[in-house]
Amino acid sequence: MGFILAQALTGLSNAAALFLVASGLSIIFGVTRIVNFAHGSFYMLGAYIAYTTMSMLPGIIGFWASVAITGVAVGLIGVVVELVVLRQVYKAPELFQLVATFGVILVVQDLALLTWGPEDLIGSRAPGLESVVYIMGEAIPEYDLAIIALTPVVLFAIWYLFNRTRWGILVRAATEDREMVGALGVNQSWLFTGVFFLGSLLAGVGGAIQLPKGGADLLMDFSILSAVFVVVVIGGMGSIPGAFIAALIISELNVFGVQLLHQSTLVLMFVVMALVLIVRPWGLLGKPEKPGQHGQVGELARPIAIMPTRGKWLFAAMLVLLALLPVLDDSFLLVLMADIIIFSLFATSLHFLMGPGGMVSFGHAAYFGGGAYAAALSVKYMGAPMEIAIMIAPLIAGCLAIIIGWFCVRLSGVYLAMLTLAFAQVLWSIVFQWGEVTGGDDGILGIWPSEWASDGVVFYYLVLVVGSAGILLIRHVLHSPFGYGVRAGRDSFVRSEAIGINVKLMQWMAFAFAGALAGLAGGLYVFAKGSIFPDEMEIARSFDALIMVLLGGVKTLSGPFVGASTFTLLQDWLSRFEYWRLVLGSMIILLVILFPQGLVGFARDKFGRLINVRGEDHA
Amino acid sequence: MLNVQSIDAYYGQAKILHGLSLNIQQGEVVALLGRNGAGKSTTMKSIIGIVPPRAGRITFRDREIAGIPTHSISQLGIGYVPEERRIFASLTVLENLEVGRQNAVDGLQPWTHERLFEIFPNLAERRNNLGGDMSGGEQQMLTIARTLMGNPWLLLLDEPSEGLAPVIVEQMAHTIQDLKKEGLTILISEQNLHFADLVADRAFIVEKGETRYEGTMVELESNEEVKDTYLAV
Ligand SMILES: Nc1ncnc2c1ncn2[C@@H]1O[C@H](COP(=O)(O)OP(=O)(O)OP(=O)(O)O)[C@@H](O)[C@H]1O
Ligand SMILES: [Mg+2]
């Protein structure tokens, strides 16, 4: 009994930080409609800054003052991000703002590395709360109890702020109808900035109070992000009490899950999330997102014309160029181009889902990595030859997409997107935690192409043929009756249903199709690298795909290719530098500010058809 | 007080207003008449800055306001009451009023809850109800009251009588007369000539984004030809 109580209390104290970060994310999303991916980075900064301030300010007062100072400092950092980055792109399509927040993640990672170094930092214990109290014979850290007591205070403070102050009322009104709030004389820009301050402050405080329990390290940003997304999905987007309840559920689940099923706490988290979503698709306390309402992440793409003859010639010319590449006899170049082709296929499959399908996936790496692992595992355990393994990859990835898609297409907009990310994290955690089968962190090594394809040039041709076939297939499907059905469903749900299109079924099939082709890309990728690691399924990989699609431009079909080339080349070139994340992140932010329509969209708008030609053969 | 000089306004590429002009003197109630889709709402959105004009000028109390942000236009003393009402559904009546509150511009007697509840007695009883739970008529009252909390000189009322029961429409006409007595200047858009007759001094008729007629209500009433051309359904 005492043991259970002790566990429950540990769970409660873990919930505090999770709740703080999740509520911050929710608040920012509610008003600005920006899913701030950099929120995990603010949490990480909170832990690091608190480490520094706590080492400078001794004693009980010093400790709690540090927490407060950290909150304000991180809040101000949030304000800087809002003013310098996001304010420039509020007018851009909403999705595009996400890319800017990815850039911020990269920049913060390197700034933290520069400032605090690569070592994990261990926070000292909170002065005055170093010892334990015994409850029913179990030792409970005093600090845990202090945090447990703090959480309701924070919850009340947030409630008070939003319900009893003018600022809070304005924020709630802006959550419903920003434009009307402006017409009533309120300057929304400062409201946004204030919201960013508060949301970032909460994340910073979350990082600070977590420091004595968990320390500070450079992986905190992504690790909290997946938990936070699960919390927000379960609790309901934009609901503070929902975030509170969900944070409690998840934290308790983790604590007790470890006892029951050592390794699979993350899987357990997923099961609970799935159960909640079956019963309540919008989360425990969330409200449905009305179609067409502000804040839908999906955006309407311009109708994509059947490729004009000119376009066909360009495409053919490009293939010829790529096919001639081995003439240069540069094996590095071939490896790089193979990567670009693989990522183009990956990005094109995501583009299919996002542009024509109108469904944004934050977790597309699940299928890329899923295909890659399927291929690698079939080689490792069944001795499958490369040819079979590459065929298995899209099949398994497609099956995963069918299962995950079943849950996701019940939702729309940002809920759908968050859910895809949560599922991707689950797959990642299975791969990561199930070491006996997948090799866990060590990955699977020695997956090489068949004898006939082991030569670099031959393998390059294989990638070129399979990759462009995949891309052409996506294009082809887009202009099939199925493709038109999918687009019709995106443009008008009601009208499509009325003319007898089963929109949800179409979306589900589109999901599976996109997943399968991402899996195909993953299958090629394993053999290109000879190995596979869980990283390929991580959030960061999903974000790469999003950046490629958005950088290229959602509205154009050549976008994914241009985006994948630009991004891969940039990354290849920059990874020589020690602080390449800083540079890449800054460049991404700059690109977003300069080209809010994406590179191809920009070229088309600015220079019309002329540059479109160049845009096409640029890669 | 307000002078709109040949403005052009667009939604994306679609040009909706073609050199539209109108003017309002202090203390007047002016009706903006025209059929469905004539451009009445767009005119109001242009004035308040939601759809800023791409050509032409708008001056309010001798200040150029075309092109400045919506919230600044509102702060200068123009209150906008949208056609769709746009009540904050999850906020209570009092909270809705709070969002609209602005300091009084010089020389106006500031609106308080008490004064508003005198004019809109229904709202007083429902002050702690959620905006989303109110009837259509109550929401129309609330949206006007909310805008009045900003202490505007000029009120832009977009089809206040639309979709209301006849009794409520009559009540609305009285309310507008009351507001006029309080010294407010009002621009009201209407399809319903009868309602405009009850409240307005002068009228402009819009058709396809242009002003086609300007005159007093009395003149308009006697001009069968204009009524037939622009207003007959
Ligand atoms: N958001 C919009 N985007 C594109 N076109 C619009 C939009 N709103 C209105 N329009 C078009 O602009 C034209 C003028 O519309 P407006 O709403 O100003 O007319 P109105 O005179 O207020 O009509 P009603 O009496 O129906 O309110 C119409 O043709 C309408 O279809
Ligand atoms: Mg209208």
Image (cartoon, rainbow, N blue to C red):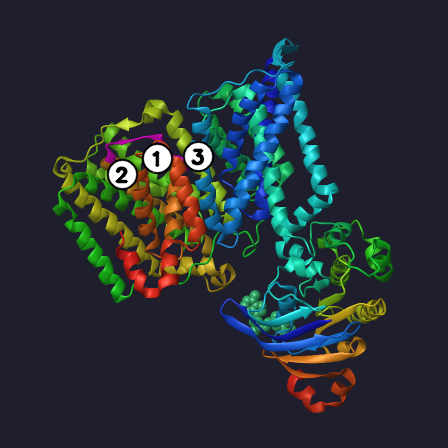
Q: Is mark 1 within 8 Å of ligand 1?
A: no
Residue A425 numbered tag: 3
Q: Position of residue A613 (x, y in %)?
A: 28, 61
Observer-nearest of B142 and A559:
A559
Q: Is residue A48 magenta?
A: no
Q: Chain of mark 3?
A: A
Q: Residue at x 46, y 37 (%)?
A: A105
Q: Position of residue A539 (x, y in %)?
A: 42, 36
Residue A536 numbered tag: 1
Q: Alpha-carbon distance for marks 3 and 1?
A: 11 Å
Quadrant the N terminus of chain A occupies: top right
Q: Alpha-carbon distance for marks 1 and 2?
A: 10 Å
Q: Position of residue A203 (x, y in %)?
A: 57, 33
The residue range painted magenta reads: A529-540
| CB within 8 Å, label 1 to label 2 | yes
Q: Residue at x 40, y 60 (%)?
A: A485
Q: Give the residue pinned by disc 2.
A: A525
What SS does tag 1 mark? helix
Residue A380 numbered tag: none
Q: Is residue A537 magenta?
A: yes
Determine the image quadrant of residue A546.
top left
Asked whether the viewer can see residue A3, the reply is yes
Q: Chain of mark 2?
A: A
Q: Residue furthest front?
A: B62
